[in-house]
Amino acid sequence: MTRIRRGYVARRRRTKIRLFASTFRGTHSRLTRTTIQQKIRALVSAHRDRGRQKRSFRRLWITRINAAIREGGVSYSYSRSINDLYKRQLLLNRKILAQIAISNTNCLYMISNIK
């Protein structure tokens, strides 16, 4: 029987994985089996940390808004001022409010004092 050469499908799959893991250190970028494991691990971490990043940014924005509000004495607390904004139907998200709190605190006071 003649020798059958394998196709290029498996080789292409391995090269794709190797390109993904080319920046990994040591065996994690050289051996196929460990490269596949590290790729899975990296993708799981990336997926998990996208949610964590959203949470941490929201916490940062809330902290900034709260600090600006307490510093100026506009309202008693962050929660009361957000509640007042909702009552007045001023729908500004926390990211924008945090940017306003940093760049222009007078504008934040004006927004929170509108009745």
Image (tube, helix red, strand yellow):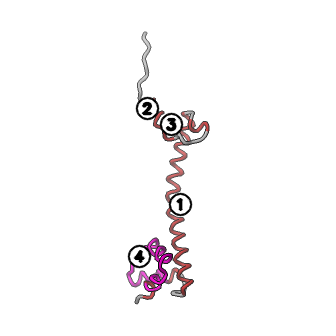
In the rendered view, tell whether residue 16 sits above or below residue 57: above
In space, the residues marked 1 and 3 are separated at their CA atoms by 28 Å
Which quarter of the figure is the N terminus placed in? Answer: top left
Disc 2 and disc 3 in contact, CB within 8 angstroms: no
- Image spot of residue 62 (x, y percent): 52, 73
Mark sitting on residue 92:
4
Residue under label 2, please give it. Answer: 12
> How far across and down, in percent of the image, does residue 31 sit?
57, 33
Label number found at residue 52: 1
Amino acid at pointer 2? Arg
Looking at the rendered structure, the secondary structure element under dot 2 is helix
Q: Position of residue 60 (x, y in %)?
A: 54, 70
Q: Nearer the viewer, residue 84 or 64?
A: 64
For label 4, count other residues whose C-alpha is less than 10 Å away and answer few (under 14), some (14-19) or many (20+): few
- Callout 1: helix, strand or loop? helix
Q: Label 3, on which residue?
A: 18
The amino acid sitting under disc 3 is Arg
Which mark is first along the chain, 3 or 1? 3
Which part of the image, by quadrant, shows the C terminus?
Answer: bottom left
* Disc nearer the start of the sequence (4/1): 1
Magenta residues, start to end: 81-110
